């Protein structure tokens, strides 16, 4: 069986940096807390938790004076304030591409602009970004959200909208939403579009698209709660009906009438999980 493994499958630089630096901290400290899971990958999290990492979803549950990891998704300003009050030793592993967005939106809001954030409202990266927009933002996931966002913007009396995206958002969908927003209010208001989709994401999505057009079966590896993996799955599925989304090789069942398999993995999938799947398929 021919196996085509995506060159960009697996950890992006932001996740790799977060995982490696967390391991360093665990070598120095007996106990290290993380505010939220570092990656949406159970295997990686189990390994870190076995080394002493303690994950808490709420900063109030982290004991005063301890060491806390802020993951690649970033956190809103309020969390930095609480961490300071609790005298936490912050290891800030916010990805540099996310930090760039925090700086961008802060600047634009300071200059009196309103922000449309294209992404998933409840995603931690978006929660962080919105914190830096200080109430001057609306989140848009799909066309149904545009009217509400425009209503919110108009209520502020501001004159300009800046559109940015979640780093892992689908590029085509982002463009479609931008066009729709421009059609709706582009004549009345100034609109500036900044494509903040991470390059690692764009390349991975493009490669998934290319591979899935040329195989009989597509396997997407990644956590079931990983939104970037979900996007890869949707892209692959649109080209190749026989697409499955798995976390480990144990979830692969039927492989029939297949001669060419494509494999891609989300940004939080470690190399070992990917190679497990590759070896398993090659053995079929
Ligand atoms: S997907 Fe991009 S922005 Fe997000 S953590 Fe990875 S490198 Fe950073």
Image (tube, rainbow, N blue to C red):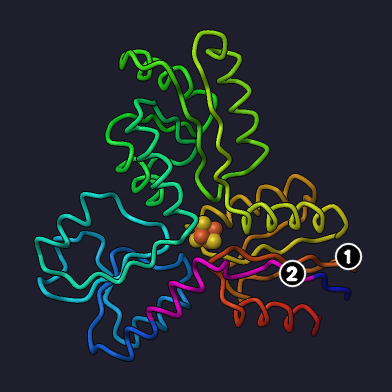
Q: Quadrant of residue 23?
A: bottom left
Determine if the C-beta at disc 2 is less than 8 A from ligand 1. no
Numbered disc total: 2
Crowding at label 2, few (<14), some or many (≥20) Cα neighbours within 10 Å?
few
Q: Which residue is mark 2?
A: 7
Instruction: Pick the residue in front: 101 or 73.
Output: 101
Q: Is residue 59 visible?
A: yes
Residue 101 image position (x, y, % from top left): 45, 47
SS at circle 2: loop
- Horizontally, residue 251 falls left or right of residue 29, namely right
**Does the magenta segment cover residue 10?**
yes
Residue 257 — which label?
Answer: 1
For the point 46% across and 24% down, the residue is 161
Whole-percent x, y for residue 126 in the image: 40, 45
The answer to which of 103 and 8 lies nearer the viewer is 103
Which part of the image, by quadrant, shows the N terminus? bottom right
Q: Seen in the image, is 30 located left or right of residue 281?
A: left
């Amino acid at each position: 069986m021919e196996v085509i493994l995506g060159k960009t499958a697996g950890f992006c630089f932001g996740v790799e940096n977060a995982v490696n630096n967390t391991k360093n901290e665990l070598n120095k400290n007996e106990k290290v807390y993380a505010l939220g899971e570092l990656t949406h990958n159970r295997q990686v999290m189990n390994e870190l938790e076995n080394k002493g990492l303690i994950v808490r979803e709420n900063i109030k549950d982290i004991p005063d004076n301890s060491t806390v990891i802020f993951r690649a998704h970033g956190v809103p300003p309020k969390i930095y304030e609480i961490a300071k009050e609790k005298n936490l030793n912050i290891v800030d592993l916010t990805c540099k591409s996310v930090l760039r967005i925090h700086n961008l939106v802060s600047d634009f809001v300071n200059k009196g602009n309103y922000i449309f954030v294209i992404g998933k409202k409840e995603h931690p990266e978006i929660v962080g970004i919105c914190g830096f927009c200080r109430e001057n933002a609306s989140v848009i996931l799909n066309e149904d959200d545009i009217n509400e966002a425009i209503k919110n913007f108009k209520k502020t009396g501001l004159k300009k909208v800046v559109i940015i995206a979640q780093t892992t958002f689908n590029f085509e969908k982002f463009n479609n939403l931008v066009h729709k927003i421009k059609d709706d209010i582009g004549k009345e208001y100034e609109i500036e579009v900044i494509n903040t989709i991470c390059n690692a994401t764009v390349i991975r999505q493009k490669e998934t698209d290319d591979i899935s057009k040329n195989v009989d079966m597509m396997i997407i590896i990644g956590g079931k709660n990983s939104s970037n993996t979900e996007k890869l799955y949707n892209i692959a599925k649109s080209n190749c009906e026989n697409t499955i989304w798995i976390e480990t090789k144990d979830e692969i069942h039927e492989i029939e009438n297949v001669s060419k398999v494509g494999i891609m993995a989300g940004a939080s999938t470690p190399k070992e999980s990917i190679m497990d799947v590759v070896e398993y398929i090659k053995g079929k």
